[in-house]
Amino acid sequence: MELKEVLFSLAEAYGASGSESPAAELACGLLREYCPDARIVSGNVIGTFGTKREGLPHLVLDAHIDQIGFVVTSITDEGFVKFEQLGGIDRRLIAAQPVIIHGKRDISGVICSVPPHLSGGNEVVKYDDTAIDTGMTHDELAEIVSAGDSVTFDVKCRSLLGERVTGGALDDRSGVAAILYALELIQGRELAYNVTVIFSCQEEVGERGAKIGAYQLDPDIAIAVDVSFALAMGEDERKCGKLGEGAMMGVSPSLSREVTDALISAAKSADIPYQLEVMNSGTGTDADRYSVNRSGCKACTVSIPLRNMHTPVEVIDLDDVRSTAELLAAYITEG
Amino acid sequence: MKELLKELCLINGVSGDESAVREFIIDKVKDCCEYRVDPLGSLICFRRGRKSSEKKLMICAHMDEVGFIVTYINADGTLCFDEVGGVNTTVAIGRQVKVGKNGISGVVGSTAVHNLTKEQKEKAPEYDGMYIDIGAHDREEAMQYVSLGDCVYFDSEFTEFGVNIKSKAIDDRVGCAMMIRLIQEQPEYDTYFVFNVQEEIGLRGSGASAFSVAPDFAIVLEATTAADIDGVGGAKRVCCLGDGPVISFMDRRTIYDKELYALAMDTAKELSLCCQTKTKIAGGNDAGAIHISGSGVRTIAVSLPCRYLHSASCVIAERDLEPSYQLVKRLAERICEL
């Protein structure tokens, strides 16, 4: 599997929360290589890896397939498209951003902004005061765009120096790519778990896909493969992982210390770099839904360090995706 | 002209580093005019017309675009940078950029939204609070690719959407595009065409080039602020996309020649073209330096209305291009016949 190629194709597919279809269908196709039964169920991509063996615990590997974006709320008489956010968007950076409105067909637009030549230009945009410029009239738009349609940043992935890359939906297509890569690594090997993979929808609006996915799959153990904060200028060193230094394993009262410890031991014995991410309660990831699913489940987080989270310029190190996959593979094969 | 505009917009030329734009333009016009490059880098072309006029006319536009400059390389391999020309931080944060002559890819990063206080979320960032990430692990690695003083450009595509066009640098490559066409199609009267440097950092190139050309009349071709967006009404819109070329009576740097203003308006009428004026005294352009150069130059500006000026997403209406060109062409003739 050519990791960068797969990651770029995933990150350039569209899938704002609630409108994940293009990204989910792409991910489902990729997953089918390893899980022939992969399918989309209520928005979640679900696939079973290998043949189920009696007596082994059921492990669910989760990454979310949705991305932050916007939702169309109305079209003005002049042909501007009003919108609000899907997920936690940094409004400081939306002015003059190119976007794609996913209507009956995709159309390009630009988020309106006021230039420095007019007073009051350098202000953080509020949704009530802005709109998307489409270069179309109200009537032309009405044929293509409806309230509820999703909008995403119009951004392509780029390679930076070395193994570092940037793109718009690396949160959490990096997690999806890491799981796919892990499956490739464990193909044909003896496993300690019955493994099911889920690429869940609507994480960015409150882990809603994982809530129903957890119920359907009823795992004994669940690992949410997501992204977390990487150290950069303006971030607190005490609260961040570092790019290129491996997956960040969650340690939290809400997570299973037993699973965290097993992940650490798997990393150590296979000489895989890792970092710890200590949290004091919830994790803000799909793990929060698995842990309290049905009568309870042992959950943990494995996060890929990422800069500029929830922006069109997220940055990761591909080596972290690789070591995350290696860690998952070591854990699944060693038990 | 749209194809020419696209080629021009995609060339990188931040103020002080306009050479790539200049070389492109020279290549387009060298066979049909005399030209020289002045000490600051402005390109001065003399195009013989079908006739000569006693009046010396100069038509000009600026080659430079807004962008950034690398000011420091941090220990972690990220770059500190500052604006070149007026770029709001809100249109710098969260963009892809290209750094230096080798076009190293980078992004403008800042603290993740999750880690901002409520107050910080509502406040535009400062340049000091942002950095450019090229993927380097440390200063030493970054220095192999980037030097202090390297220019930084928006990495943005030229896109047509609806009836509009979106690109970086439309300000003022649209003026350059019109001038290239005017030179190629041969004007009616002898004309100086000047492609200026350093407009965005204070109208610096145009003062020097106007001094050496010493024209009687000047027409400045520009892109000007249009704020005809949702939620902005009446005079605050300044000017509107699709309503034709903008002829200003005044901006922050110039009170335009009243006779030329009337002549431009009348020329639009003669050609049955839509045209408009600015409904707010906003912005400024090379006219500010030109009209007070030497013993004074009678000056007018013709601009294309442009939304989101000074961002990676300048937006103009395609249907404003041709009438603007036709107006300038005819106005030049009428000025020479004054």
Image (tube, helix red, strand yellow):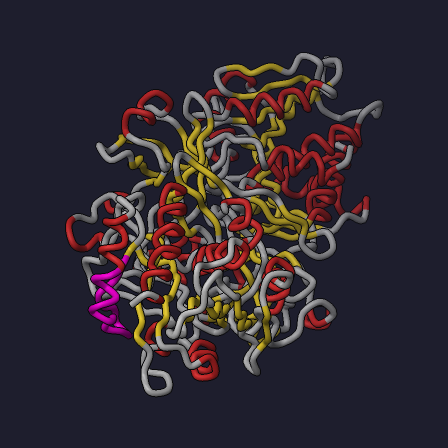
Is residue B248 inside the magenta stretch? yes
Indicate the position of residue A198 as horizontal and vertical percent values: 59, 24
Residue lying furthest left in this view? B234
Does residue A315 sit above or below A193 in this rendering? below
Is residue B173 inside the magenta stretch? no
Left or right of A4? Residue B41 is left
Q: Quadrant of residue B120?
A: bottom left
Looking at the image, how many numbered discs can be counted on the residues?
A: 0
Quadrant in the picture for the C terminus of chain B: bottom left
Does residue A42 sit above or below A89 in this rendering? above
Indicate the position of residue A137 as horizontal and vertical percent values: 30, 31
Frontmost residue, A121 versus A118: A118
Q: Residue at x 63, y 42 (%)?
A: A260
Q: Is residue A313 visible?
A: no
Q: Residue at x 62, y 25 (%)?
A: A27
Q: Quadrant of residue A226?
A: top right
Q: Which residues are magenta?
A: B247-263
Residue lying furthest bottom in this view? B295
Left or right of A274? Residue A92 is left
Indicate the position of residue A113 as horizontal and vertical percent values: 33, 52
Frontmost residue, B151 versus B31: B31
Left or right of A321? Residue A109 is left
Q: Residue at x 40, y 74 (%)?
A: B56
Q: Is residue A278 visible?
A: yes
Indicate the position of residue A32 as horizontal and vertical percent values: 69, 18
Does residue A170 sit above or below B96 in this rendering? above
Does residue A218 sit above or below A316 in this rendering? above
Q: Residue at x 56, y 16 (%)?
A: A40
